[in-house]
Image: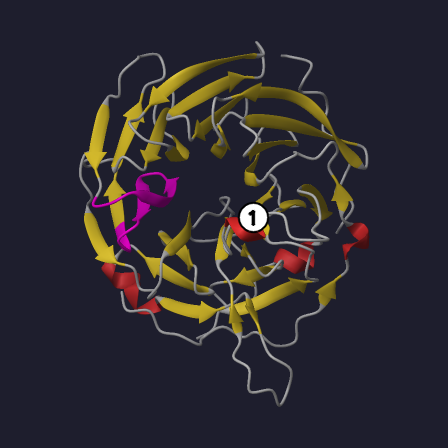
Amino acid sequence: MSSIFRAPGSFGASAASTARPGLVNTSNTGSQAASSDIEVNPSPPDGISSLDWSSAADFLVSGCWDNNVRIYGVEGAGAVPKAMYSHEGPVLDTIWSKDGLRVISGSADKTAKLYDVQSGQSNQVAAHDAPIKHVRWVDQGNGLLATASWDKTVKYWDMRQGNPIAQATLSERCYAMDCEWPYLVVGTADRKIHVFDLQQNPNAPAFSIDSPLKYQTRTIACFRRAPEVGLEPMAPGFALGSIEGRVAIQYFKDEHKGSNFSFKCHRKEPPTGSREPAVVCPVNEISFTPQGTFSTCGSDGTFTFWDKDARTRLKTFDRKAAPISATAFNRDGKIFAYAVSYDWHAGHQMANPPNSGKDKIYLLPVAEEDIRRKPPKR
């Protein structure tokens, strides 16, 4: 194995379909100062679009608007750069393969590339007629790649071949996508949610619905939880975040749809007694832990941990100097990576405001009690 994968460091090891609104308990939540957060150096020099952890070791990949993909390794109490490769346009998404030995990236240059950490080589594995917004690893056989683009298509690739093995036409441009076998979920610019059952037919959605949220879809994350003895598998579904500071919890199967609900988050409330309205901020990303709990992050510069089954907030954290553009939990949930980076929610004129902080990636040691599931509400 390449020297990029040394033994994991000890960082974080000791820390210990109608949506129904308003069903999340948002009270009694402490605040976490940034003193324990460890900055990843060197930071990317431009907007950070994505973060993802390897399943093989504590290695973090980031995609950036400077056209580069960077891989960092956790060593001791910090992280160090391990590798970098480039696209010819901004990198919009990155993800590791299931074995944690390959990185796939999608770019505004209309291509997807694969980087092999053992050989140190990258090569193009997919192409579209417009920027590739999302890439996802499909856990089937030796593994397939799903790419979704602003050309209104999803394509599936056996990366040993030069052409897609299947393709689906979307109703509009892809704005969000995630995959948890056998389901692939795509949110499009027309507020449609398309759910594919890849076991049955990858070329057409099993069903499509209007988003349960009124405003533009920003992010989608399929439910996931590591297998646990004595615990029934999690009912399949997904969490959906919008630009209006809301998250919807949606289940795929009819017998679970009575548990669908939505809640407000990432809003800047006015001072007590003020007549000013709340400032509503986009939800930029939703990331699940191996325990089945999840985080949300937003343009308000905050991130929060939640338990969907107990419908409660687990932990809230101090506001940062800029939006949180991307997040990811590592393979055991003990390290939380987050990017402080402008997300374009206020337009190009705010891209370089006075006194703005630089784009940065931080690692937060996660205490077990901050992501532990609570007893579900009855």
Q: Is residue 164 left or right of residue 268?
A: left
Magenta span of residues: 171-193
Question: What percent of the width, then of the height, locates residue 293?
Answer: 53, 56
Which residue occupies the foreground of this view, 44 or 369?
44
In depth, the one of 313 and 320 nearer the eye is: 320
Report if residue 181 lies within the magenta region.
yes
Left or right position of 3 against 52: right
Compared with 25, 156 (above or below) is above
Label 1 sits on residue: 325
Picture coordinates of residue 100 (x, y %)? 54, 26
> Relative to 377, does residue 51 appear above or below in the rendering?
above
**In which quadrant will I find the C terminus?**
bottom left
Look at the magenta stretch and give its main secondary structure: strand
Q: Is residue 343 magenta?
A: no
Query: Which amino acid is tagged 1?
Result: Ser
Mark 1 nearby-residue class (10 Å; few <14, some 14–19, many ≥20)? many
Task: Residue 140: give x, y in percent of width and height.
Answer: 34, 27
In the figure, 261 relative to 78: above or below? below
Q: Quadrant of residue 370?
A: bottom right
Q: Position of residue 143 (x, y in %)?
A: 38, 24
**Residue at 24% across / 45% down in the picture?**
172
